[in-house]
């Protein structure tokens, strides 16, 4: 079930955020994610966050800011079971246009978004990590 973020979800959401970022971005020092943890925790309530919950457990979530996907995160043990796709489809039902940035080296995520009808619109350097990231977009008109 996909539902709106609740305040008491913050610990589960942040644990998923940290765990999945470290696992998906082995090309970035894990300290980068740990150092940004508190800032992200403050920003989460300011975004539109939707949690995927099953049996009382938050298994994943999507964070959106005006059609910009800040991220889709799914607990490692629940990945490849359609949760990310369900969250993305939920976002597509709300917005006519979506955009995001993804590290080029995060090949699994890049392939996921390409398969979900996103296209690469730009390549740029993330100044905070020095890594190349892809700007991707999706539109209902595609």
Image (spheres, helix red, strand yellow):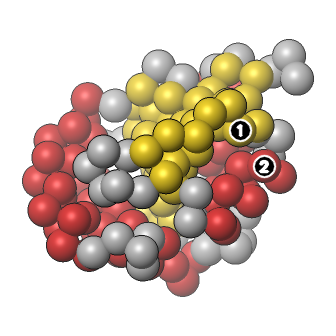
Note whether 86 is above or below 70 in the view shown.
below
Residue 117 percent across, percent down from the top left: 82, 40
Structural crowding at the residue carrying mark 2, measured as other residues with C-alpha within 10 Å and reported as few (<14), some (14–19) or many (≥20): some
Horizontal placement of 15 versus 61: left or right?
Answer: left
Determine which quarter of the picture holds residue 12: bottom left
Determine which quarter of the picture holds residue 121: top right
Disc 2 marks which residue? 114
Residue at the image position 88 percent from the left and 23 percent from the top: 142
Note whether 140 is above or below 104 in the view shown.
above
Residue at the image position 30 percent from the left and 45 percent from the top: 127
Determine which quarter of the picture holds residue 21: bottom left
Badge 1 vs badge 2, beta-carbon distance below 8 Å: yes
Disc 1 marks which residue? 120
Q: Disc 1 on helix, strand or loop?
A: strand
Horizontal placement of 32 versus 125: left or right?
Answer: left
Residue 75 percent across, percent down from the top left: 48, 72
């Amino acid at each position: 079930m996909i539902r709106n973020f609740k305040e008491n979800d913050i610990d589960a959401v942040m644990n998923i955020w940290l765990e999945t970022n470290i696992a998906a971005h082995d090309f970035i020092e894990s300290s980068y994610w740990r150092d940004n943890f508190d800032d992200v925790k403050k920003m989460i309530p300011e975004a539109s966050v939707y949690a995927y919950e099953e049996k009382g457990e938050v298994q994943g979530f999507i964070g959106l800011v005006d059609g910009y996907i800040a991220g889709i995160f799914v607990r490692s043990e629940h990945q490849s079971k359609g949760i990310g796709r369900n969250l993305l489809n939920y976002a597509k039902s709300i917005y006519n246009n979506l955009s995001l940035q993804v590290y080029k080296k995060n090949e699994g995520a890049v392939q996921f978004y390409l398969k979900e009808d996103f296209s690469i619109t730009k390549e740029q350097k993330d100044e905070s990590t020095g890594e190349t990231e892809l700007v991707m977009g999706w539109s209902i008109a595609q």
